[in-house]
Amino acid sequence: MNLNLKELKKNELDNLLFVFKESRHNSDFFIRKFSNKYNVSHIFLRDKLNKTNNEIKNFINEIIQEKKINTIIFEGDHLSEINFEFIDSFNKVKKGICLLDDYMYHEVNLITAQACDFVLTTCPISASKFEERGINSFFTMLEGDGNLFKKLNLKKKYDVLFFGSMNSNRIGYINKLKENNVNLKIVDKFYSESKKFSDLVKLINESKIVINFSKSYPLKKFFSNTKNISHVYQLKGRPFTAGLCGTLCVSEQTPAFELIFNDQEIPIFKNENECLKTIQSLLSNPERLNKLSEKFFLKSQEQLDTQIIVKIKDFIERSNLDISVKNQKIPIWYEFIFLKQLIWIHFRKSNLKTYFKQTGEIFMQLYKKKIIYILFAAPYLIFYSIIFLLKNSFRIIRQLNK
């Protein structure tokens, strides 16, 4: 009887397909988040490099028909096979993109989003930028799985925990805390004790405070409006993972916090001295630390998957592509960087047959393009085809000589 009820409930849900570039923990988080309100299917494009782009599109259309897909969400940001043309080729389904690093790829994402009904982004400032251009956008954190990130009520072993990679901006803060005898625990994804998220959750629960650094280094590409600046202050997922585990986060400033928290909900620092002073003040006053930790925990609950997915589903149902947005011109540079990326992906991963089938598909589409695009694209395709033949010839010779 229980199985029948579960099956009935599943049949009542809308069917959604994620198209990711490759399998990473980010994709797992999105799948789990949306499984609260959808029947979720997914594909990883890196598993389909035996197919050309047109063959992948046909494969996705078969999934749409077979599984009665209502909504497709494509992974955005980093350059891949997924661009405006790729997304625009799918009809009769609602389409969106999900973004994690829009601060680096906003100029590219803005063009790709013109083929979409909606955008999901992990930064509220990013969401506002899309809304300014008439593109439906929703802010949601990636880390909202309450079955994973939760209170374990463990004894606190560490004053401060930092999990993440070390860089030149962060080392000064870390050294300052060590010099002042703060009981500091540092881990990253390569540490055996924090490789699994369940292990990281245990460490967060065993810490009184999690420290977060917001400063990030932008993309230095010609199409990025951050190419001439030294850094940006990015919203990270670290505060939310800490909060869901019931641990207070003390964070470097970022403007995005002002759209999520008030000044009483998360302690902010702007330099090494402020960081040390804030942490020492909290550690010397356990009652205040506990009170702030509980307040931060309750605030973080707003980002739980089970709660936020209800709002996301309603947002998706209300979102529709504005044709006036879609009718904006696609610049030559955008088309060319995706052409280069597509060729490069197949150059590295494809076999001889697939590579030349893909190249042939691109050549067949050139007649639709502007002459200036053809003047750049045709020599590029020919050059890499010659290199690909040479590379495979040398590989075969090496195998024969073994």
Image (cartoon, rainbow, N blue to C red):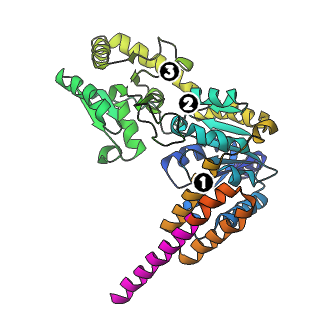
- Report the residue at 78% width, 41% height from top: 327
- Report the residue at 79% width, 60% height from top: 65
Disc 2 and disc 1: Cα gap in Å?
28 Å
**Residue flagged by tag 1: what amino acid is it?**
Phe
Q: Tell me the mark number nearer the camera, choosing from 3 and 1.
A: 1
Q: Which mark is residue 178?
A: none
The quadrant of the picture occupied by the C terminus is bottom left
**Vertical position of residue 252 compared to residue 21: above or below:** above
Q: Percent position (x, y) of residue 266?
A: 44, 17
**Residue flagged by tag 3: what amino acid is it?**
Pro
Q: Nearer the viewer, residue 21 or 383?
A: 383
Q: Nearer the viewer, residue 222 or 110?
A: 222
Decide: few, some or many residues near mark 2? Use Cα within 10 Å; few <14, some 14-19, many ≥20.
Answer: many
| Residues at marks 2 and 1 touching, judged by CB atoms closer than 8 Å | no
- Report the residue at 53% width, 17% height from top: 258
Question: Would you say 217 lies left or right of 39 here?
Answer: left
Q: Percent position (x, y) of residue 246?
A: 43, 25
Q: Does any portion of residue 36 appear in the rendered image?
A: no
Disc 3 and disc 1: Cα gap in Å?
34 Å
Element under disc 2: loop
Magenta-colored span: 380-402
Q: Main secondary structure of the magenta part?
A: helix
Q: Which residue is mark 3?
A: 255
Decide: few, some or many residues near mark 3? Use Cα within 10 Å; few <14, some 14-19, many ≥20.
Answer: few
Q: Percent position (x, y) of residue 262?
A: 52, 13
Sooner in the amino-acid sequence: mark 3 or mark 1: 3
Does the magenta-highlighted stretch encompass residue 171? Answer: no
Q: Which residue is mark 2?
A: 123
